[in-house]
Amino acid sequence: MDNRSEIRDFMVSRRARITPQAVDLPADGIRRVPGLRRSEVARLAGVSIEYYTRLERGNLTGVSDSVLNAVARALRLDDVERAHLAELARNNGPAARHRRPKNHHGVRPNLQRMLDALHGAPGFVLNGRSDLVAANTLGRALFAPLYERAETPNHARFVFLDPRSGQFWTDWERVADDSVALLHVQAARHPYDKALTALVGELSTRSGPFRTRWARHDVRAHTTGTKRVNHPVAGPLELTFEVLTPAADDDQALVVYGAEPGSASADGLRLLAGWAAAQGEQPTELDHADG
């Protein structure tokens, strides 16, 4: 994946969303493109138009933190976007070609034991390409539609290429947005990840909704919140989730779901655990389904 084009498209997309009025600049003349002109962003950042043009064309090699912060302020970047721009700058240049993501086809045994100890709570481990590289019994049951077609399913591929995903994810639009945003984060961290490049190419070719979202260059934090699913066995579930990044495996994320005690979703998780046991999975304790 071309890091320079990622930088260019990200910075141009952020510039396009800022109106002159938002930064107290006169809206003079006819503008051929939405948002601010390069010269206006350069002025706000306190750099020359020539230097800013060089940055926006994808050359962040050697840029100082102070200049990067000034550009981030001029573009009105939030904390997640600032971190994304810094990651793009860090991986800009020849040295980035030698940095590769860890080749995780699974998880460390200790992490798998942690997953299996989460009785009554669906849990799984996701890598930066959105492959589900591990799950506990209830996690596999919760995401049964994904596991029907692959032993190591890819969540982004399910969201955009499997017609069942619109029925499974009640908030499909938000899930789709989050999925693409996470892939953009991975692209910044590992611009020369061949497997990621292939995945983005496949999804771009086969899915219009993915292409539209990829072109937005949105990034966001995805650490806690609520997800709603319509499970083929357990029915509608409203689940909270927490995302943790293991210090020893920063290219993986541990995701744990739960339900409010006494809620219909907690009952649904108990039903799902019983169904998983009946399918021949390892027995799951049913009296801790409050997550």
Image: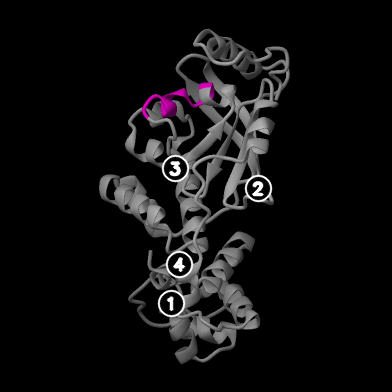
Please state, as top left, top right, bottom left or bottom right, where the N terminus lies in the image: bottom left
Taking the image as shown, residue 130 lies to the left or right of residue 283, namely left
Q: Which residue is drawn at 57% across and 33% down?
A: 227
The magenta span reads 141-149
Please give the label number shown on residue 245. Answer: 2
**Where residue 179 sits: x, y (%)?**
47, 45
Q: Check disc 2 and give the amino acid type.
A: Thr
Front residue (pair 272, 54):
272
- The secondary structure type at the circle numbered 2 is loop
For marks 1 and 2, the one nearer the N-term is 1
Q: Residue at x 51, y 70 (%)?
A: 91
Taking the image as shown, residue 195 lies to the left or right of residue 259, namely left
* Residue position for label 4: 10
Q: Is residue 6 placed above or below 142 in the rendered structure? A: below
Q: Is residue 198 placed above or below 45 in the rendered structure? A: above
| Mark 3 or mark 2, whichever is nearer to me | 2
Q: Check disc 3 and give the amino acid type.
A: Ala
Magenta run includes residue 67: no
Cβ atoms under marks 2 and 4 closer than 8 Å? no
Disc 2 and disc 4: Cα gap in Å?
Answer: 25 Å
Q: Can residue 112 be seen in this view?
A: yes
* Residue position for label 3: 176
Q: Check disc 1 and give the amino acid type.
A: Gly
| Mark 4 or mark 1, whichever is nearer to me | 1
| Mark 2 or mark 4, whichever is nearer to me | 2
Rendered image quadrant of residue 237: top right
- The secondary structure type at the circle numbered 1 is loop
